[in-house]
């Protein structure tokens, strides 16, 4: 008994000796690992997408029968992809989605690394199959679980393990978004409904995001800076601030509509959720049929947002709104049928379409202001990430609209405080372990829970 007690005391002593310098080194290592993982994932995904959507259609086009137009390849490919996703989940097990990741961040404070192979394989198949979900969720799972694993291997306290888990999540998003500070804050905001609370992880999370961002950009050759080229906005005026407020209100309303559509589709799938292969197959078919009539809804929309910016004005208000609603359905079928991935860029896509439609209907609103504010409001209402979403969109759009984006984001955030899609978002618990030793002398105390209720 005394030997066991001595061993426990020794382990505890090792935990208390984990200082700030060691944390920074771990954060840097996690960031480098995250950048390498994101690079490999990127090249594998790009190769799979090219084979399925460019090489293969050209090979089989001559064999299509006269009565079957070649554009039917879309729903055939998504349906076959759905079968593949279903089989992968059936054989490897379901790795869980963002809600489960958020739940594990709170308790037990780490992500299970054993689910990583299933997440990688199933998500690659799902994204390649044209689902409306992106690679940020699987990358968060992979890198976040690596941070958890590293913390366990170093025998750290649960508070420190959680910090390293956040570092992994930030590394994933830093590579994906290309905005290290915004990515780190996004990882820290998303576990909560009412603002960032795991303040002790901010600095190490940013360090991980920076290293991952640098490794990924150097490895892939992707340029640094904005990826979307919006029409320049004249110098901002107080009227633009009012527009941000009004667009935030509209964005909140559109997001609530999406959440109810998402729940309705989920209700339909609950009758077959026990059959993973059937569920994924029907989901793939639904995604393909929607895309057969509205091709803009296919994939996770990072590239499709370019099309909205460049040619969206030619579509008209009604078509833009129709595409937005169709995308809501595509996201819902994607996620409820077992297709794995994140929904951030799909939400941006919906916001871009609705924002441009508003600008066309109300010419006083600049199209760039309409699109970016709606992109922010849509994402914030669903993910509850007003600070990080504002920063990320400011970087991605390469504009000086941050004050307007912040207003739209926080208006949407406040209006949708009582409704959420990620049901496990909550305040950090009152039973949380002590903060890491490197913050022991901080004047900031552990935040107690003020709201542990579930999502209505």
Image: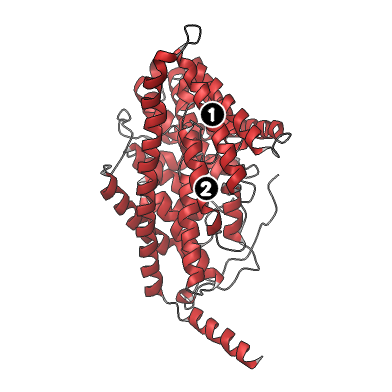
Of residues 391 and 84, which is closer to you in this image? 84
Precedes in sequence: disc 1 or disc 2: 1
Residue denoted by label 2? 119
Q: Is residue 359 above or below residue 51?
A: above
Image coordinates for residue 435, horizontal then vertical, percent: 53, 72
Image coordinates for residue 220, horizontal then vertical, percent: 29, 45
Residue 422, label in figure = none
The quadrant of the picture occupied by the C terminus is top right
Q: Nearer the viewer, mark 1 or mark 2?
A: 1
Q: Is residue 367 visible?
A: no
Residue denoted by label 1? 80
The kind of secondary structure element at disc 1 is helix
- Left or right of 358 on screen, residue 402: left
Of residues 384 and 76, which is closer to you in this image? 76
Image quadrant assignment for residue 308 = top left
Residue at 50%, 65% (x, y): give it. Answer: 149
């Amino acid at each position: 008994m005394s030997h066991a007690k001595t061993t426990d005391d020794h382990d505890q002593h090792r935990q208390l000796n984990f200082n700030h310098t060691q944390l920074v080194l771990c954060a840097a290592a996690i960031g480098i690992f995250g950048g390498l993982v994101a690079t490999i994932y990127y090249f594998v995904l790009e190769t799979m997408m090219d084979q399925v959507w460019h090489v293969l259609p050209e090979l089989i086009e001559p064999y299509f029968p006269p009565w079957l137009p070649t554009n039917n390849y879309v729903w055939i490919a998504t349906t076959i992809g759905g079968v593949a996703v279903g089989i992968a989940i059936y054989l490897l097990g379901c790795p869980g989605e963002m809600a489960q990741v958020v739940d594990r961040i709170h308790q037990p404070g780490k992500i299970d690394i054993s689910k990583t192979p299933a997440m990688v394989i199933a998500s690659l198949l799902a994204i390649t199959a044209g689902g409306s979900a992106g690679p940020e969720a699987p990358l968060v799972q992979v890198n976040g679980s690596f941070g958890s694993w590293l913390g366990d291997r170093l025998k750290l306290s649960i508070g420190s393990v959680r910090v390293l888990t956040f570092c992994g999540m930030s590394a994933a998003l830093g590579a994906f978004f290309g905005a290290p500070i915004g990515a780190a804050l996004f990882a820290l905001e998303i576990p909560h409904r009412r603002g960032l609370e795991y303040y002790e992880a901010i600095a190490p999370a940013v360090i991980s995001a920076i290293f991952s961002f640098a490794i990924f950009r150097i490895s892939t050759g992707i340029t640094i800076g904005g990826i979307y080229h919006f029409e320049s906005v004249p110098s901002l005026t107080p009227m633009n601030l009012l527009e941000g407020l009004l667009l935030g209100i509209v964005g909140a309303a559109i997001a609530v509509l999406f959440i109810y559509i998402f729940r309705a589709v989920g209700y339909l799938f609950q009758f077959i959720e026990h059959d993973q292969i059937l569920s994924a197959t029907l989901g793939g078919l639904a995604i393909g049929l929607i895309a057969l009539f509205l091709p803009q809804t296919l994939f996770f929309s990072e590239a499709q947002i370019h099309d909205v910016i460049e040619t969206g004005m030619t579509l008209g208000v009604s078509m833009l709104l129709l595409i937005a609603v169709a995308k809501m359905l595509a996201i819902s079928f994607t996620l409820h049928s077992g297709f794995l991935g994140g929904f951030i860029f799909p939400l941006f896509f919906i916001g871009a379409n609705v924002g441009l439609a508003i600008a066309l209907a109300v010419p006083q609103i600049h199209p760039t202001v309409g699109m970016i504010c709606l992109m922010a409001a849509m994402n914030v209402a669903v993910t509850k990430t007003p600070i990080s979403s504002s920063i990320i969109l400011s970087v991605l759009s390469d504009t000086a609209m941050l004050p307007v984006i912040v207003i739209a984001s926080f208006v949407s955030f406040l209006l949708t405080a009582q409704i959420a899609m990620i049901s496990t978002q909550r305040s950090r618990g009152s039973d949380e372990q002590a903060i890491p030793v490197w913050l022991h002398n901080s004047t900031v105390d552990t935040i107690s829970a003020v709201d542990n209720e579930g999502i209505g």
